[in-house]
């Protein structure tokens, strides 16, 4: 059985049968394994293709050639954001959550992640940096980055 959720809990629809994704085990592949190792080390990787760097990193470049994984560093900039005041059940959150599209200068693409900033001070163009979980708690997932916070 699968549930199809469109928005809030009241919008859930029941769908009979199994989702095909439940039948497979997915592996990260060579690039995914390197990305996971980097996250455990507190680093974020991109893929360099013909002089450009792209995030999120993938095994292949837009022209289908194989790229080179490289660490991306620098100031992350908030390109756009949303402030969430209610959970998916319509209950007011104790503290608003902010999710933003974050970009690096001279890098194509970006990451969508939580930002820990006062909602009154957030703005497009704000410089932020990632905050990682303690090393021993990291699992090689994007969630190893707890959130991004204001650069000081």
Image (tube, rainbow, N blue to C red):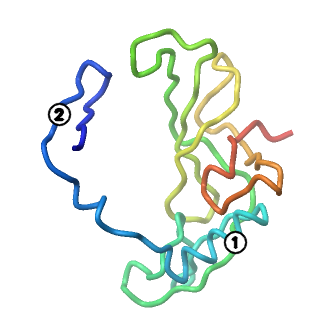
Which of marks 2 and 1 precedes in the sequence? 2
Question: Vertically, is 24 above or below 138?
Answer: below
Question: Vertically, is 117 above or below 107?
Answer: above
Quarter of image, res 64:
bottom left
- Which residue is label 2 attached to? 14
Helix, strand or loop at disc 2?
strand
Residue in the foreground of this view, choosing between 24 and 80: 24
Give coordinates of residue 50: x percent, y percent: 52, 86
Give the residue drawn at x 69%, y 67%: 72
Give coordinates of residue 35: x percent, y percent: 62, 71
Residue in the foreground of this view, choosing between 90 and 104: 90
- The dot on residue 94 is none
- Which residue is label 1 attached to? 37
Farthest residue toward the bottom? 65
- Whether residue 6 sits left or right of residue 125 in the image: it is left
Residue in the foreground of this view, choosing between 37 and 121: 37
Give the residue drawn at x 71%, y 70%: 38
């Amino acid at each position: 059985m699968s549930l199809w959720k469109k928005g809030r809990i009241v919008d859930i629809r029941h769908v009979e049968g199994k989702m095909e994704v439940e039948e497979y085990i997915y592996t990260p592949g060579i690039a995914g394994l390197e990305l996971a190792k980097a996250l455990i080390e507190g680093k974020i990787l991109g893929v360099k293709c013909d002089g450009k760097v792209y995030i999120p990193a993938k095994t292949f470049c837009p022209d289908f050639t194989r790229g080179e994984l490289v660490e991306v560093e620098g100031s992350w900039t908030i390109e756009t954001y949303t402030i969430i005041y209610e959970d998916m059940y319509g209950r007011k959150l104790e503290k608003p959550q902010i999710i933003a599209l974050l970009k690096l200068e001279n890098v194509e693409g970006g990451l969508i992640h939580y930002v820990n900033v006062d909602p009154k001070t957030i703005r497009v163009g704000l410089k932020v940096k990632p905050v990682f979980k303690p090393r021993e708690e990291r699992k090689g997932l994007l969630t190893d980055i707890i959130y991004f916070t204001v650069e000081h």
